[in-house]
Amino acid sequence: MTRAAPITSGFADIVRSQLRSPLAAGLNLLVLLAFIAILKPALDWAVFDAVWRRESGAACDGATGACWAFIGDKMRLILFGRFPGPEQWRAAAGTAVLVGLVMASLTPSCWGRRLVWSWGAGLILYFVLMAGGLPGLPKVSSADWGGLPLTILLTVFGSGLGLVLSVPVALARQSRLPVFRVAATVYIEAVRGVPLISVLFMASILLPVILPEGLTPGGIGRALTGIVIFFAAYMAEVLRGGLQSLPRGQYEACAALGLGYVATMAKVILPQAFVIVLPAIVNMVISALKGTSLVVIVAMMDLLGTTKAALADPDWIGFYVEAYVFAGIIYGVMCGGISWYGRRIEHRFVSSREHKK
Amino acid sequence: MRSGALSGSLPFGARLAGRMRQREVQAQIVFCVLLAALVWGFIQAASGIEGRGGAQSGFGFLREHASFELGESLIPFQAGDTYFRAFLVGLLNTVKVAVCGIILSTILGLVIALGQLSPSILAARLCRLYVEVFRNMPLLLQLIFWHTFLLRGLPAVRQALSPVEGVYLTNRGLYVPAIAPDPAYLPMLLALVAGLALSILLRHMARQRDGVIAPKWRLAMIFGPPLAVFLAYGAPFSLDMPALAGFNFKGGWTLTPEFAAMVIGLTLYTAAFNAEIIRAGIQGVAKGQTEAGLSLGLRRSQIMRLIVIPQTFRIITPPMTNSYLSLTKESSLAVAIGYPEVVRVANITLSETNRSIECIALIMIIYLMLSLLISALLNVVNARVQMQHR
Amino acid sequence: MRRRLLNVVAAVIGLAATSASAELLDEIKARGELTCGTMDYLAGIGFLDDAGNWSGFDVDFCKAASAAIFGTPDKVKFVAVTGAQKFPALASGEIDILSRSVTATISRDTTLGFSYIGPNMMTGQGLMVHKSTGATDYDQMDGATICVLAGTVTERYLADYFKAKGMSFTPVAAENGDQLFSMYFDNRCDAVTMEPPYLAIRRQKMSTAEEHVIFEDVIAKSYEAPMIREGSPRFYKLLQWMHYGMVTAEELGVTKANVDEMVASSTDPRVQRLLGVEGTIGADMGTTNDWMVNVIKAVGNYGEFYDNNLGANSPLQVPRGLNALLRDGGALTAPGWQ
C-alpha cells in the first residue's frame, strides 16, 4: 500500500459525507444513541458487575452482572463432555490434527498426493488419540466423546463423507443412463424436501431396525450416517452446478484424446468442477456445523448438549444467558472463521482466474 | 464377455460402442437388482419387527384414538380424537409458525438489507454485524435460548405485566382480548369474498376495454358489502377479555411462549439470510437504472420504490423461495422446545404405538408435500414477476 | 454373476433373520457382555456421572443380571436411550434389557411383543404443585397447566384421568426430565406429573423444596418393570427369578454382608436352595448354581437394592411404600423357591 495518503483524506471525506446527507446523519445519530444506550448496561452486565471467580459455593447469589464463574466451573464439561479428565489433551490434540487436515484440504495449492497420505496418517493418529487402547493411552469409549470434539468430528466427517458420497450422486444425476439419473434425482429431491431432524430420527431409530444385529453402528455412527445422507444430497446439487458450468469443449477434448469415462471425470472434469464450487462447499460445511447441533434431539452430547447438561446442575440454576452466549460465541467464531476462509479462497481463485484471461 | 461372438465382424469403434452400451445396460440392471434387494430386505426387517406382536403395519393406526392432549391447536382437539386428527393439528401448527416466520423474516430482512445499503456507515455496519452474528449461530441454540428467555425473563401468572387493560404478559404466554364470535361474522366474511370477486371481475372487464377503475371504487366494492352486513346486524361487537380464573387466564387470545420462541428464533435467523438475498438483489439491479432515474429528476426514495424494488423482485424470487423452504423445514426444530407441530405429534404417536417406520415416513411425507406446495406457489409468483418484465 | 450377487444378498438377510430368533441367553453368553438400555440423567434411577460411572436403581438391575449370568456385575454395556428410542432400540436387538422406568401395561405387553420382569417398582402417577396455587387435591386442578414428559405413559394417564373427571388441563410437553422440571420450577406450569418418588428426587434438589406439594395418592397405577424381547424363554425366566430371588433373600434375611456366612453355615433349607448350596436350580437355568450369591453380592437383596438407590441409605429418602415386603405392609412378594 503506497497510496496511504488518499485513504486518510478519504476518511475525512467519508465523515463529511456522513454529515451532509440528512438521512445518513439522522441514521448515524440514531445508531450512535442506541449503541450508547445499550453499551453501558451490556458492559456492566458482562464486565463490571460480573462475577469472574468462584470463591464460595454460591458465588453468584445476588450478583447483578454475568456469572462467568459458572462458565469457569463448567468449562471442562462444556468443552469436552464426559471425556475422561486426565485424557482430555488427547481429544484436544486429535481435534487439532483433524482441523489442520481440513484446512489443508480446503486450500487448492495443497491438493496432491501428499495430502492423501497426510489424511491416512492423520486419521490413524486421530482415532488412536480419541479411542486409545494402546499402552499409555487408556481406552476411551466413543459413548464418552462429547462437547466440542464431537461437534467437530460430526462436522468434519459429516461434510467430508457427504462430499465423497456426493460425487457419484452428482455424476449419476448428470448421467445419460436413465436408471442412475432417476435414482439420483429421487434421492436428491427427497432429501432436500425433508428436514434434517427427520433424517436424524431415521438414522437413530430406524437404522437398528433395518440393519441386521451386530452391524448397527453406535450413537455417533448413526448420527453421522444421518448427517452424511442429508448433506450429500445438497453437495451433489452444488457439484452438479460446477459440472454444468464447465464448457462442453472440456468433454470433447477428453473424448478426442481417447480418455475413458473414469479418466475424463477423475483427471479433467472433477478437479475443475471442485475449484469452481469450493466457495459453495465451504458454505455447506458451515451449514453442516450448525446442523450438528440437532444431534442433541437424539440424545447426544455435542457442544449444545454439554451446554444444556451444564445448565441442569442444581447448584448453578439460572445462568442460561452466560451458557448460551458462551456456546454461541464458540459456534460463531467457528462459522465466521470458516466463512472468512472461504471468502479468502474465493477471492484468490477468482482473481487468479481473471488474471489468466 | 458374451459379446465376444460379435467382435470379429465389426469395426473397432462400433465394437467398443456396443460393448460400452452393453456394459451400461448391465450396470443399470445390477443397480436395479441391488436396489430391489435393499428394499426387500428393508421390508423384511421392518415387518419382522412390527409383526412380532401380531400388530398390523401400515397407516391403519391413524384411525385409532389417541390418548394425549396437544396444548395448542387451531382446530379443536382432545384426548380420544384420532391420530389422524392429531397429525392434522401438528400440520396446522407447522403451517402457522411457518407463515408467521416467513412474513416477519421477510420484513426484517428487507429492513436490514436497506440498512446495509443506507448512506449511513454506522447503520450499514450494524446491519452487517446483525447478519454475521445471527446466521453463524445454530438455529437450535437460538430457539432454546429464546424459549428459556421467555420462561425465565417473564413474570409468573400471578405477577402478570399488564401494560393495557386486558393485555397480560406472563411466562405462560401473552393474553390479549379477542373479538367475541357473533352470528353476523359469517355473512360478513361471505360479503367480503363476494365484494372481492366482484372487484376482480370488474377490473378484468375494464382492462379488456383498456380502462381502469379508480382505487377508491375498488376499495368501496371490497369493503362496502361486509360493512353493510355489519350495520344491518346492528353492529355487534364485543371483546372476549382474558381474566385470571383459577390457575390461568381464561378467554381472549393466547400466544404461548413456545410459539413465540419459535417465531422469534425463526424470524431473527432467517432474516439474516433474507437480508443477504435482498441486498444482493438490489445491488444486482444495474446501476444505470438508478442513474436514469436520477436524470429524470426522481428522488432516491422514488427510485427505490418505482425502479429498483420491482426489478429486485425478479432477481430474488428464486433464492427467497429456497429461504422459505428452509424456514418451513427448520420449524421442525420446535420439537426441542415442545411446540406441538408435526415432529412432536409424530414423536408422541411413535412412543404410544411403536410405529416408528410409519411415523418417520409421515414426517417426511408431510414435509415433502409442504415443500412441493411452497415451490409451486412461488413458481406462480415467479412466473408473474417475470411476466411483468415486458 | 447377477444371480450369485442376489444369492449373497438373500443369504446375508436370511442370516440376520435367523440370528434374531435364537435364544438370547446363549447369545449373550457367547458375546460375553450384556447390553442394557437405561437413562443417564436421573440420580437414583439411572445416572451417568462426569467420571463415567453408572448408578441407580435401573442401572443396578442390569448389574445384577450381569452377576447372574457372568458372576460379576461389570459385564454390562450401558446405552442411554431417549423416550422415543427405547422401544425401537429393544425391538431391534440393539439392547438386551430395557431398564428405564418403563411402565408395564397390557398393550405394551401384548401388542409390542415385549415381556416384562417383575414389576420391580410399584408406584403410581402423582402431581407436584406449586404451593402458591393453593391447590391441595386433584379436584381443584380443573383448568391447570401441567408439564408432562413427552412419550411417556404419564401423558396418557393424565388425559384419561381428566377426561373421566370431566375436567380440562393444558399440557406442556418436555423432551427430557431436565427440561420438564426446569419448566415446572420456572412456573411455566402449575403442576408436573410423574411418579411420586421421582417428584421427590427433583424437589429434594431444589433450594425452594418447601414451596412445592406432592399429591401422594396417585391417579393411576404405574408398575415399572424392565423389559426384554419376546422369544427367549430361558433369558426371561432367569431375570424373572432373579427378581423373585432378591425378594426371597430379603424375606429370609440374606444380605450383602452376610451372604458368604449364610452359604457357609446356614442350615435353613430355604436359604440353602436359594443360594445354590443345595440343588441344581442355577445350572438347570443355564447359569451357575451360586448365581443368586453373585447377585446378592453385587446389589444386595431387594431391600438393599431399593434403599441404597432410592430409600433410607440414599440422599433421596423415598419411602418403600408398596415396595415393602407383604409382611411389612407392602405389596412385594414372590412365589416359593422350591
Image: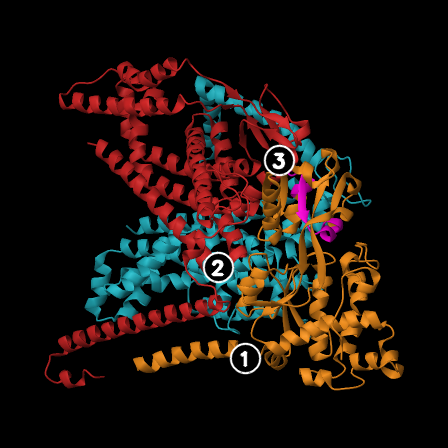
Chain colours: A cyan, B red, C orange
Q: Earlier in the sequence, mark 1 or mark 3?
A: 1
Q: Which residue is mark 1?
A: C22
Which amino acid, mark 3? Gly
A116 within the magenta span: no
Crowding around mark 1 (Cα neighbors within 10 Å: few <14, some 14 to 19, many 20+) is few
Q: Which residues are magenta?
A: C183-201
Q: Quadrant of residue C80?
A: bottom right
Q: From the image, which quarter does the C terminus of chain B lie in?
A: top left
Q: Is residue A161 left or right of residue A254?
A: right
Give the spatial CA distance, label 1 vs label 2.
24 Å
Q: Is residue B348 left or right of residue B19?
A: right
* Residue drawn at x 75%, y 49% as measured from the top left: C200
The picture places residue A163, in percent across and down from the top left corner, at 41, 60
Which amino acid, mark 2? Arg
Q: Which mark is residue B355?
A: 2
Element under label 3? loop
Residue A105 appears in the figure: no
Q: Chain of mark 1?
A: C
Q: Quadrant of residue B36?
A: bottom left
Give the spatial CA distance, label 1 vs label 3.
52 Å
The picture places residue A296, in percent across and down from the top left corner, at 57, 53
> Could you say which is closer to the camera, residue B135 or residue A8?
B135
Crowding around mark 3 (Cα neighbors within 10 Å: few <14, some 14 to 19, many 20+) is some
* Residue drawn at x 30%, y 60% as measured from the top left: A173
Q: Which mark is residue C143?
A: 3
